[in-house]
Image (cartoon, rainbow, N blue to C red):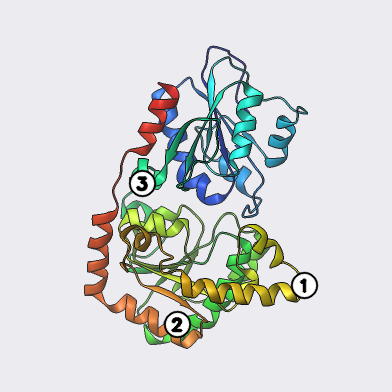
Amino acid sequence: MSNLTNNTNKFHLILQTNSPGELAAWVQPIAVLAKQHDPSCVITLCLVPCQYASGQETAAAAAICEIDHVLTPTQTLAFLVGFKSLPFQSTQGAVLCLGGDPMYAQLLGWRTGFYSSIYTEQRKKPGLFFKHVFYKHQHGDLMAAHVRLFTRTKSDVLAQYNLPDQPYLLFFLGSRPSHFKAFSALFLQMLPFLLQQLPDLHILLPLAPTLPVHVVEQFKQRCQFDRVHICQGHSLDFMAVSRAMVSLPGTNTAEAMYMHLPMLTVVPLNRPDLMVVDGVLGLVGKLPVVGRLIMKLVIRVLSRQIKFVSLPNKIAQKMIVPQYIKFIIPKDWASVIIDFYCDTANLSTIKQQLTDIAHDQQTDQAIIAKLLG
């Protein structure tokens, strides 16, 4: 995607990212505010290799209209080793890492001659050669800026997706194909119990754009229920019309926190071979036969040691939203969801607690002020 001709007087902002969560939650608010701050600013997004990537990141990035040019991971690597040039050249600019290995951002700075900066969830210093380091725990959560951009009304959302006006129970089954494979199978086993026990329940089921087309079609064929509404679109749209949410840990729990949406966070231990684990353990877990056995042991140990998996609970260091970290038996899981969804008083309490902890520190403005002046 390229809309540009070279103009060395324009500021060139080079953003680095890697996977769907960072692309939606971090890149978009920075790109939007950068264009508001300086409409002539040119933004190039460099995708980098990532084990969590779905392969759909390039298309998703191209849909962010503030981004002028997108490099695939292969193109980014080609640029770093000198086999490709950027589609736009300028004498002034900056590199900002918004996900992925910090090494790539430092190399991008070296190749362009721009200084590099980074926004990170880590608490330790990410490297020696960053001009600015913006820490999530210190400077604030960019997810708050992402949610701040959302201004649509409930009626607008219902009309766009042709949905009846119902107090929906929202399910997110994962944006990564491996997670979706594991979680959707359990969901389909649990669903008949849930619909039978709650005859008036309507379920909202968005499917992530990062899922392969054949996976989406197969799931739709298996999930044909009158009160299950399968959609594809913006996650915040569906949160805005829902009463409560059930989700794996990840970006959705952060979005829901800033949307003040009560949630039940689920970690199914049934398929440890499909869990994504970083580093050496992740590689060992892929080994035939022995890998699955090792992953079962690792997941069992981690499930006992990790106290909080949902972001609101991590921030508050107490149980604000319920967590379900178990080997899932569909009928038992349905009972837990029913108790959660039907407890109006508890949902109201969770909503208020989420409102109390979800603070917007205007992180995007602080970053843009440093980079663009």
| Mark 1 or mark 2, earlier in chain | 1
Q: CA distance from mark 3 to mark 2?
A: 31 Å
Q: Which residue is mark 1?
A: 288
Determine whether, in the image, residue 189 is placed left or right of residue 247.
Answer: right
Residue 323 x %, y %: 40, 72
Q: Is residue 129 above or below residue 183?
A: above
**Disc number placed over residue 333 in the picture, else none:** 2
| Mark 1 or mark 3, earlier in chain | 3
Q: Amino acid at mark 1?
A: Pro
Cβ–Cβ below 8 Å for labels 1 and 3?
no
Q: Secondary structure at mark 1?
A: loop
Q: Which residue is mark 3?
A: 144
Nearest the viewer among 97 and 161 is 97
The nearer-to-camera label among 1 and 2 is 1
Quadrant location of the C terminus in the rendered image: top left
**Disc number placed over residue 178 in the picture, else none:** none
Q: Secondary structure at mark 3?
A: helix
Residue 221 x %, y %: 61, 72
